[in-house]
Amino acid sequence: MFVVLEATGQQIQEVIKFRESKRSSPQFNHLSAVSESIPGLSWVAVEPAPSQYCREMMNAAVFYTNRVLKDFRPGKSLNFMEKDKLHVEWVNAYTSVFSELCDYIKEYHTTGVSWNPRGGAAVAAPPPPPPGGIPPPPPMVKLEPKAIEVDASAQLFQEINKGLDITSKLKKVPDDQKTHKNPGLREGPKPFIKSASPQPKAPVQAVAKPPRLQLEGKKWQEIP
């Protein structure tokens, strides 16, 4: 655990040194709020009440953030500008981060970190197995020649048996329709003889008649 927190501890010391080197800065209260609360990030090494430790670090920051609000509160003077409002928003954002961190620790790590802080060194996971090759093709099915011959023979006998059974479905012919029982059927129908076509009649010639006269108006006209 302490090996893991070594880098975090070095950064915390850097923040504290930077704040001490800026005592004449107009943002000294800002830097002090961060410097006094930043050790709260080492809560993972605190037992049995890490959330209480986090809350104490946040209260140390509030001491200086109240000074920031006092210097840049709205309505302090008629010269209050939009840039002064940024300091107020910064205070609210920073204290909100620590407040939510303390609530998280209290809910999930009440008496200390829930995972094993004294676990062994992390070991690299083994490499994955090599990908499998192409699966072999399925085996070919070999048909036995004897089985084919048996199937062909069985089919042949089945057709023969079917042919012998066909006669059982034929209708019985009565004696009056058999030629050896009824000799008259042997004569069969007579062949068709084409009748002679009628001869066309000669046209009747009209009898020639003498012309006659007919009165039309005041003139006689000859009519054939």
Image: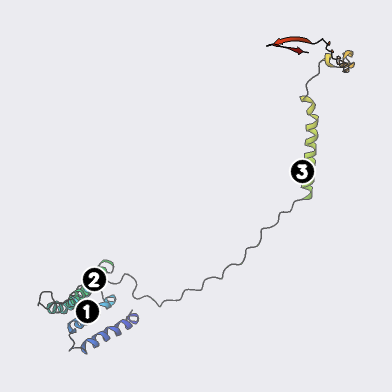
Distance from disc 3 to disc 2, alpha carbons, whole Å, reads: 86 Å
Decide if residue 156 is on the left or right side of residue 191.
Answer: left
Crowdedness of circle 1 by 10 Å Cα count: few (<14), some, many (20+)? Answer: many
Q: Return the residue nearer the eye: 148 or 198.
A: 198
Decide if residue 36 is on the left or right side of residue 188.
Answer: left
Identity of the residue drawn at 22% across and 79% down: 37
| The C terminus - image quarter | top right
**Residue type pointed to by label 3:** Asp
| Of callouts 2 and 1, the N-terminal one | 1
| Of callouts 1 and 3, the N-terminal one | 1
Distance from disc 2 to disc 1, alpha carbons, whole Å, reads: 12 Å
Identity of the residue drawn at 24% across and 80% down: 38
Q: Are marks 1 and 3 in contact (CB under 8 Å)?
A: no
The disc label shown at residue 37, or none: 1
Q: Return the residue nearer the eye: 203 or 3.
A: 203
**Secondary element type, mark 2:** helix
**Secondary element type, mark 3:** helix
Crowdedness of circle 3 by 10 Å Cα count: few (<14), some, many (20+)? Answer: few
**Rendering quarter of residue 5:** bottom left
Q: Residue 167: horizontal and vertical position, in percent?
A: 80, 26
**Residue type pointed to by label 1:** Ser
The residue singled out by tag 2 in the image is 102
Q: Is residue 98 visible?
A: yes
The residue singled out by tag 3 in the image is 151
